[in-house]
Amino acid sequence: MEDSGTSTALIPLLERISLDADDATSRRVDLPDGSRVWLVGDYDDARTVLTDPRFSADDQIPGYPCLLPAPPRPGALSFLRMDAPQHGRVRRVLTPSFTMRRIEKMRPGIEDATRRLIEDMREEGPPVDLVDRFALPLPSLVICQLLGVPYEDHGAFQEHSRAFLSTDGTAEEATAALTALGDYIRTLALRRRTEPADDLLSTAVQQQEAAGMTDEDVVAMARLLLIAGHETTANMLGLSVLTLFEHPDQLSALRRDPALVKPAVEELLRHHSIVRTALGRVALADVLLPGGRTVRAGEGVVLGIKRANQDDRFLTGPGGDGVDIHREVRGHLSFGYGMHQCIGQTLARLELQVALTELLRAFPGLRAACPLEDIRVRHTAVILGLHTLPVAW
C-alpha cells in the first residue's frame, strides 16, 4: 500500500509542472513515489497518447502512474481503466442512456430541478453558499435519478466521494471510502434484481451477463458514474460562476445574450480543465510522439490536460490567453479524447448550460458576497473545485 505522503504530494506536484506556461513540451518528471514518468503537455502529443492503442489505460500494468490517493485495485474504476475489447463491452451497456436524444429528454427535469434549487436559495435569502445550495445538489439530483440512487442518501455518497478523491488524507482512508461506496451500490444492485426500475442500474443488472460482467463489475461501473457524475459537474459549475465574477465583461455579455451560454460553457471547460492531471497511461511499445519525444515500452505517461488546452489553436481572437466566451472552442481535451472520452459529457454540458442560464435569469444582480480573493480553491483533490462560494443578489 502506498505511503500516505505520496498521495498528498502528488497532485500539487503535477499541478505545478503541468501549468508551466513557458514549456508546453512533453518531458520526464519524477513523482513522489520515486517513479519517473512522461508529462505530456503538448496538444498533439496528448491526443496521440489518448488514441494510440500502444498506450494502455490498465492501471494493473507495471509502469502505470498511480494518480489517485488509493492504490490501484483490479477493476475498481471499471471501464475507465480498461483497454479494448473489454472497455467496449462494458461501455456499450451505458451508451443508450447517454445518447444526445436521451439526454435532451432530460432537459425539462433538469430545468425543474434547477428552478427549485433557485427558489430555495431565494427563500433562504442572501448570502447563500452557491456550492452547498446549488452547484453540488443539482448534479447530485440528476445522477441519482439517472442511476436509480435515492437522493436522500446523497450526504453519505458525497462524503465518500470527497474522501476518495482528496489528497489530504491517507491511502487507507481513500480505500475505505471506495469500499464503502461499493457496499452501498452493491445493496442497491441486489434490490434491482428483484425490483427492477427505469434506471441505469437496473439496465446494467439486466445486461451484465450479455456484456460478460460480474456482479463486482456492475458495482464498479455504477460507483464510477456516481462519483464522476456529481463531483466533476458540481466543481465545474462553482468555478464557472466564480470565473464570470472575475471577468465582469464576460458576465455582462452573457446576461445580455443568453444564447452565448453554449460557447461560454465550452470556453470555461477549456479554461479550467478541472481533471488536469488525473489521466494516466503506460506504453506497451516504443512510441514516437508528434513532438519528437520517444516513450519507451513500460514507461508511464501523465496527461497535462490544462497545458494541452492552452494550445495556441484555442487562443485566437481578442481574448488571447484569457477567458473569452465569444470564441468557438472545438476539440479541447477537458472530457478526454478517443474511446475513453467521457461518456457523460453531453449530460454535463446540458447541466452547465441550464444552470448558468437559469441562475442569471433569476438573479440579474448575482454577485460574490465576499472579496474574490477570499474565495478558496480546493487544490487538495484530484478534481479542481471551490470550498465555498458565498453569493448575493
Image (cartoon, rainbow, N blue to C red):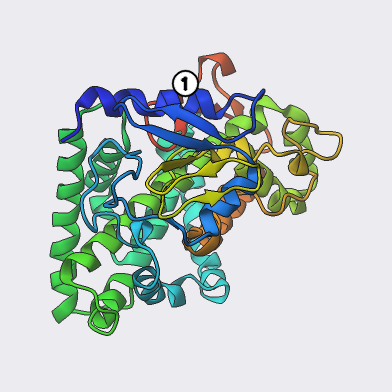
Q: Disc count in the image? A: 1
Q: Residue at x 62, y 53 (%)?
A: 353
Whether residue 355 is visible, yes or no, is no
Vertical comparison of 52 with 288: above or below: below
Q: Is residue 81 left or right of residue 301?
A: left
Residue 153 picture location, percent across and down: 23, 52
Vertical comparison of 108 with 245: above or below: below
User: Which sits in the foreground, 297 or 342?
Assistant: 297
Q: Residue at x 29, y 52 (%)?
A: 61
**Secondary element at tag 1:** loop
Q: Residue at x 47, y 56 (%)?
A: 113
Residue reaching furthest to the bottom: 210
Whether residue 236 is visible, yes or no, is yes
Residue reaching furthest to the right: 318
Task: Using a 10 Å C-alpha cutoff, classify the residue at mark 1 as few (fewer than 14 neighbours), some (14 to 19) or many (20 or more).
Answer: few
The quadrant of the picture occupied by the N terminus is top left
Amino acid at dot 1: Arg
User: Which sits in the foreground, 122 or 168?
Assistant: 168
Q: Is residue 205 left or right of residue 122?
A: left
Residue 345 picture location, percent across and down: 53, 58
Residue 234 picture location, percent across and down: 45, 43
Which picture quadrant has residue 253? Answer: top right
Q: Residue at x 29, y 80 (%)?
A: 211
User: Which sits in the foreground, 218 or 85?
Assistant: 85
| Residue identifier under label 1 | 376
Vertical comparison of 299 with 239: above or below: below
Which picture quadrant has residue 82? Answer: bottom left
Residue 216 picture location, percent across and down: 17, 65
Which picture quadrant has residue 167? Answer: top left
Q: Is residue 241 left or right of residue 224?
A: right
